[in-house]
């Protein structure tokens, strides 16, 4: 690669090489680098001009657009024509003058780079104001704690990983709902559980067909209306019960469930509580007033928003004012629907040590609400994924547009803050899917294969600072999903920031006693084989059937059988297999208990012997991703009531309660 292009790439955080999952150096193509730069609106056709812009741009303003301070005082560089004076305008309306004398540094023309020490400041979202001669400037100043503290009273906790859609009770409308979640929380809390980890409950675009993946949401700032328990709506009347759909016993039919719930909500809407809705809209502010009109426009024009009339393709488009007037009642309806969601989630898990841990997806649907409202902060001409690894030999393209790191800085990290804040509402914790994305993301150019991308870096210290501030204010636990190709600096930084890592049995090379204490332990995840599936080699059979293997089936079976043999050897050498009477699945969970990990989780599918994993990466409709109800070892779907009373769930509950702690 041309040295000047490599220099330009480095200046914008675009990688020209990386170490893969097997610690082998991989050189990135010039095309991938140029495409990533183009997504950042950097023209690599004139590298000299682009490099000159890198040098000149910081000198055009007094202050950087934002500054994130973690754990104390910091320095700021002010580029002005005279020694600057600074003032911090505090979030609470107060102010703090900056009294430290500026120190002169480099010069460019008539401007000097002055370094100023900031005083100790309270935590919060503040504003830094500077004056230099006749020039004034302002920057967002985020003062965050150095680390996220664990919830008060947390020594160790155990609980369940829940794919909520898959747990259908006798009362639900074809899909698990917030009422079913309340049942799970109350039942498991009474048995000593301290935590329940949920699949992402992010909001969908409310237009059929609904995207089944909870990891490709329309908005991460709001929550899914699909999970509403209609009978728990305050405006409920029995007349709408007839709209309940007949569920498919073998599959989760989101469209049928949503059609029935939407029809019921529309019948109940005329009786809505106007005062409660007005108060909720005032509290939620601009974010809700972007999301609700988007829903109304999507009903009119379909999805994606890129196909809408040109004048409404932006939230500030010339046709938006007229559209808001036309859709005023429908916008209010969608605000009310979010109020109902908020009411049904309020207080859930509040009596548990940790409570509900919500999952933050790595991105959003390019045609959805957040991509429309926050499009200036996203790189819409590229998508994120992962390079090839041992399990996904062709790489992964998740189809989600990434944050632009430069725009996040310019916007004072407010878009990221609002996403985190929305996910932490009514939460005891937050799991960050692919937490490596706070450090770097694999960008895949449009039209390219998933293996033809490159990494783009983010200001991880700033992102962790925003996360620490919001989590501390919510009193919430934070967990990072640090699986796959993970740089050592990532785990070091997460540990320093108090963010728990993820310890998954399949990926741990050491005996359980040597696992990281600051971690959330589980046997598997939603993207990996279930316990029974792993033992039965189900993941090989399915992937071979769907053409997802990068090697021959014989090579893949040899690898999987080797991994299984290593697991069995560990269970024998540690005495766990004998301790649990030869029951391999119980011994697997016994390994979690034997670890020092602060949080231990089990999955209902593992407890009842389900062979099928919830999601098969690399597939969309080839496999019924996110559509499978929990089923027993014979493939028979189970109701929530049957799951909770299943002998396998009873055995795992006893194991975890006895081994980790809790009241049975």
Image (cartoon, rainbow, N blue to C red):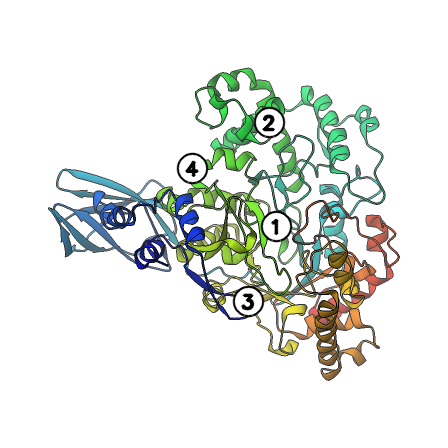
Mark closer to the chain start, 3 or 4: 3
- Disc 3 or disc 1, which is closer to the eye? 3
Does label 1 or label 4 sit earlier along the sequence? 1
Q: Earlier in the sequence, mark 2 or mark 1?
A: 2
Q: Which residue matches tag 4? A: 376
Q: Where does the image place residue 558, in percent across and percent down from the top left?
A: 73, 72
Which comes sooner in the sequence, label 2 or label 3? 3
In the picture, the disc for residue 358 is: 1
Give the position of the C terminus as an image quadrant.
bottom right
| Kind of element beneath mark 3 | loop
Pointers 2 and 1 in contact (C-beta within 8 Å): no
Q: Nearer the viewer, mark 2 or mark 1?
A: 2
Residue 298 sits above or below residue 377 on the image: above
* Comparing labels 3 and 4, the label whose residue is closer to the camera: 3
Q: In whole angstroms, how far apart are the C-alphas of marks 1 and 4?
A: 26 Å
Question: Which residue lies at the image location 13% right of the left edge and 49% below the top edge?
Answer: 83
> Which sits earlier in the primary sequence, circle 3 or circle 1?
3
Residue 349 lies, in percent from the top left, at 66, 50
Residue located beneath label 2 in the image: 298
The number of discs equals 4
Q: What's the CA distance linking mark 2 and mark 3?
A: 41 Å
How far is disc 2 from disc 1 in space, using C-alphas?
Answer: 26 Å
Q: Residues within 10 Å of mark 2 (few under 14, many from 20)?
A: many
Q: Are the residues flagged by discs 2 and 3 in contact, CB closer than 8 Å?
A: no
- Residue 97 lies, in percent from the top left, at 23, 48
- Left or right of 34? Residue 601 is right
Q: What is the quadrant of the N terminus in the image?
A: bottom left
Q: CA distance from mark 3 to mark 4?
A: 33 Å
Residue at point 58%, 66% (across, down): 519
Instruction: Provide the secondary structure element on which disc 4 rests.
Output: helix
- Residue annotated with mark 3: 21
- Which of 62/518 is in front? 62
């Amino acid at each position: 690669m041309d040295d000047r292009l490599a220099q330009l790439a480095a200046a914008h955080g675009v990688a020209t090489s990386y170490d893969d999952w097997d610690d082998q150096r991989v050189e990135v193509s010039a095309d991938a680098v140029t495409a990533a730069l183009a997504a950042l609106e950097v023209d690599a056709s004139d590298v000299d001009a682009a490099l000159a812009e890198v040098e000149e741009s910081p000198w055009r303003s007094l202050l950087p657009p934002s500054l994130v301070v973690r754990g104390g005082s910091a320095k700021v560089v002010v580029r002005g024509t005279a020694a600057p004076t600074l003032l911090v305008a505090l979030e609470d309306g107060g102010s703090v003058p900056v009294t430290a004398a500026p120190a002169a540094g480099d010069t460019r023309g008539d401007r000097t780079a002055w370094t100023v020490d900031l005083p100790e400041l309270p935590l919060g979202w503040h504003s830094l104001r500077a004056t230099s001669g006749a020039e004034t400037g302002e920057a967002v100043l985020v003062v965050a704690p150095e680390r996220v503290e664990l919830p008060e009273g947390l020594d160790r906790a155990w609980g369940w990983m829940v794919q909520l859609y898959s747990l259908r009770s006798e009362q639900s409308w074809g899909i698990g709902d917030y009422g079913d979640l309340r049942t799970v929380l109350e039942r498991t809390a009474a048995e000593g559980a301290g935590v329940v980890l949920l699949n992402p409950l992010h909001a969908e675009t409310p237009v059929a067909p609904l995207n089944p993946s909870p990891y490709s949401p329309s908005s991460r700032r709001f929550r899914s209306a699909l999970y509403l328990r209609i009978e728990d709506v305050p405006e409920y009347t029995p007349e709408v019960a007839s709209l309940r759909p007949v569920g498919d016993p073998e599959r989760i039919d989101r469209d049928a469930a949503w059609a029935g719930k939407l029809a019921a909500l529309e019948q109940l809407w005329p009786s809505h509580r106007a005062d409660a809705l007005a108060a909720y809209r005032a509290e939620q502010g601009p974010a809700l007033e972007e999301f609700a009109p988007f829903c109304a426009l999507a009903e009119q024009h379909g999805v994606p928003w890129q196909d809408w009339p040109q004048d409404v393709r932006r939230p500030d488009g010339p046709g938006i004012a007229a559209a808001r007037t036309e859709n005023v009642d429908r916008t209010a309806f969608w605000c009310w629907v979010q109020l109902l969601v908020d009411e049904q989630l309020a207080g859930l898990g509040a009596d548990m040590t940790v409570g509900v841990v919500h999952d933050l997806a790595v991105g959003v649907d390019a045609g959805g609400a957040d991509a429309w409202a926050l499009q200036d902060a996203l790189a819409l001409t590229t998508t994120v994924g992962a390079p090839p690894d041992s399990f996904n030999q062709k790489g992964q393209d998740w189809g989600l547009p990434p944050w632009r790191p430069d725009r996040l800085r310019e916007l004072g990290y407010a878009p990221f803050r609002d996403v985190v804040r929305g996910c932490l509402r009514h939460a005891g914790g937050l799991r960050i899917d692919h937490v490596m994305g706070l450090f770097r993301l694999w960008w895949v150019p449009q039209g390219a294969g998933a293996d033809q991308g490159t990494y783009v870096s983010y200001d991880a210290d700033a992102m962790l600072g925003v996360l620490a501030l919001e989590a501390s204010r919510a009193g919430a636990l934070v967990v990072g999903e640090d699986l796959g190709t993970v740089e050592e600096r990532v785990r070091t930084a997460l540990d320093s920031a108090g963010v728990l890592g993820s310890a998954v049995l399949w990926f741990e090379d050491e005996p359980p006693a040597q696992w990281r204490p600051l971690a959330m332990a589980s046997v598997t995840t939603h993207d990996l084989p279930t316990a029974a599936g792993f033992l039965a080699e189900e993941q090989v059979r399915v992937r071979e059937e769907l053409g997802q293997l990068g090697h021959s089936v014989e090579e893949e079976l040899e690898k999987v059988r080797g991994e299984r043999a290593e697991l069995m050897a560990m269970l024998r050498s540690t005495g766990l297999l004998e301790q649990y009477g030869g029951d391999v699945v119980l011994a697997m969970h016994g390994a979690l208990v034997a670890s020092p990990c602060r949080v231990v989780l089990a999955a209902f599918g593992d407890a009842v012997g389900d062979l099928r994993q919830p999601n098969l990466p690399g597939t969309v409709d080839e496999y019924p991703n996110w559509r499978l109800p929990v089923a027993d070892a014979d493939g028979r779907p189970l109701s929530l009531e049957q799951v909770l009373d299943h002998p396998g769930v009873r055995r795992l509950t006893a194991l975890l309660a006895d081994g980790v702690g809790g009241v049975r």
